[in-house]
Image (cartoon, helix red, strand yellow):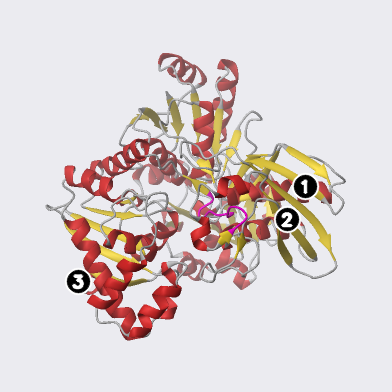
Amino acid sequence: MILIFGGTTEGRIVSSILDESGKEYYYSTKGAFQEVDLVHGERVSGAMTHSVMRDFIREKEIRLVIDAAHPFAAVLHKTIGEVTSELSIPVIRYERKYSERTGQVIECASYEEMIQKLEAQPCRRLLALTGVNTIPALKPFWSKHESFFRILDREDSKEKAEAAGFPFSHILYFRPGEDQAIFDQVRPDAVITKESGESGFFEEKIAPALEAGIPVYMITRPALPAHYEYVYGPVGLRKAVERLCPDFFPLKTGFTTGSTATAATAAALHALLHEGEMLTEATIVLPSGEEVRLPVEQVVKTERGYQATARKYSGDDPDVTHLAEICSEVSFTTEHEGIRFLQGEGVGIVTLPGLGLEIGGPAINKTPRAMMETIVRRHYPTGGVDITISIPKGRELASKTFNPRLGIIDGISVVGTSGVVKPFSLEAFVASIVRQADVAVALGADTIVINSGAKSEKYLKNAFPELPFQSFVQYGNFIGETLEKLAQLAIPKIYMGIMLGKAVKLAEGNLDTHSRKVVMNKDFMHRIARESGCSEATHTLIDSLTLARELWTGLTPDDLEHFMLRILDACYEAAAKLVPESKLSILLIDDDGNIRYTYPQDFLAQR
């Protein structure tokens, strides 16, 4: 069993990730004011002393604690640290993102130090954005100087302010987006805040003061117990839980070849910059911005620089590259000033257009390139760098893929749009779909937005900001199985987001669009072009295609509209019969994330 300490935005994220497992867990908050949507979690309210927490963990047989509480809940963090250390229970800290300390803000380790600095300024009119619990600690200052405190508009907050003797005439209530208005109302000559991080709206809070040149004083966040293990987002959390509680999630996630190559690149660069120092783990940045750590197996010196090896782990996805070694050699060069990617053994060569890569160059896709560039420039901001990726068994593995049909020869591609591999075995993935849909239904959703993966889901979340994140469910390649499960749940409205490559396959009637089972059928595309009245130029383009997405830029506007609308008609014909009781809409997304065409055609106007 897992115990979460929440009451924060991070706590909600943690509970949503754990809900995907279908397993029970506990979610603890000090008060009962915050609304939390738990599907499989049990809410526990009330402050826990050392003995209460220890007894609870023993009685409920807690094997893992996740601390997602507010960074300034110092007493709670201390108690968690003491109890878990005593009981030898591992702790994951789901950490929020913090702004880089740049010197713009005056740091204070305590309220006593803050008061001293305010007095020395001197400050005669203060705006405090530190919350109601800091009113008693700052009484030595506000009892002598005019001060305004912004607090939450809740009865318990008002009671605390009254108990501290603070005048209600100088209380302001928190309203999102009103930072500038409050600043203009008070016109302070100093602002104080806490290092609350991104989810605490830190940047928004201090922006008006910085723009006006008003001093900002910040209480720095307290240190956490030494044995905490830190994660910085959903992926890191999922991987940590999989490792520390192996039976909690029935499906294990993995990382793409691109993420693995980036980890090897980070380790090789580190050795190059630090006189051969060898890392056993490397930090990379996923396309989502989350930092994660991947293991590195070997780092060796080469004639040009250093080469590191990391092993691809695909989780429960039956990928041909699972456990393959991926190597990256990093070297500095004066031949150019940028970052150049070179082909090593087992990495394919691009021979056809349409992939968005240079013909004759290594088959390393744009997202992995960007991930490696991010890591290199973080530690080596300027100068020429060569990165040579090699995959020792790449030629052998390539024979088990469709790469040759895409014009990639002599090896495999380094790919990955999200950096993460979610399991795509039929039984396991469909079980995951069911859990995601169950969570959304349990929370009262009447609309489910199904999508193929992280990239299309990001686009759709931007298009439908009013929908809760639980309404978005990934189908991977299993469109048929996903729709069948949603039919069983009687979902009133289903929006299917789909990109062109999968849309062409679905239009032909393929309800499983995995490239191992079906590839782009040019004969079918010619048929669609004839049925929709496209010009002869469309047929010429189809004959030369490498990937379906080339149609976006290769067709005339008239041919594009005729072709895409007919594709969507065929997609609807293939999919709608599986969800006869639901209102199905299909949204065709281009490579830039725009919903270009819909079925029905007036969907966007009728929303």
Of the numbered discs in the image, which one, if any, rests on residue 307? 1
Residue 340 vertical placement versus 68 (above, below): below
Give the residue at x 43% y 28%.
Answer: 248
Q: Classify 10 Å Cα crowding around label 3: few (below 14), some (14-19), many (20 and above).
A: few
Q: How many marks?
A: 3
Give the residue at x 28% y 52%.
Answer: 511
Which of these two is toward me, 250 or 570?
570
* Left or right position of 340 against 242: right
Of the numbered discs in the image, which one, if any, rests on residue 335? none
Can see residue 362? yes
Q: Is residue 183 magenta?
A: no
Which of these two is toward me, 69 or 445?
445
Specify the segment rendered in magenta.
409-419
Q: Classify 10 Å Cα crowding around label 1: few (below 14), some (14-19), many (20 and above).
A: many
Q: Nearer the viewer, mark 2 or mark 3?
A: 2
SS for callout 2: strand
Disc 2/disc 3 C-alpha distance (Å): 51 Å
Residue position marked by numbered label 3 in the rendering: 606
Sooner in the amino-acid sequence: mark 1 or mark 2: 1
Can see residue 465? no
Q: Position of residue 158 (x, y in %)?
A: 39, 46
Amino acid, disc 2: Thr
Amino acid, disc 3: Gln
Residue position marked by numbered label 2 in the rendering: 388
Disc 1/disc 2 C-alpha distance (Å): 9 Å
Sooner in the amino-acid sequence: mark 2 or mark 3: 2
Does the residue at mark 1 contact the one at mark 2 (Cβ under 8 Å)?
Answer: yes
Disc 1/disc 3 C-alpha distance (Å): 56 Å
Sooner in the amino-acid sequence: mark 1 or mark 3: 1
Amino acid, disc 1: Gln
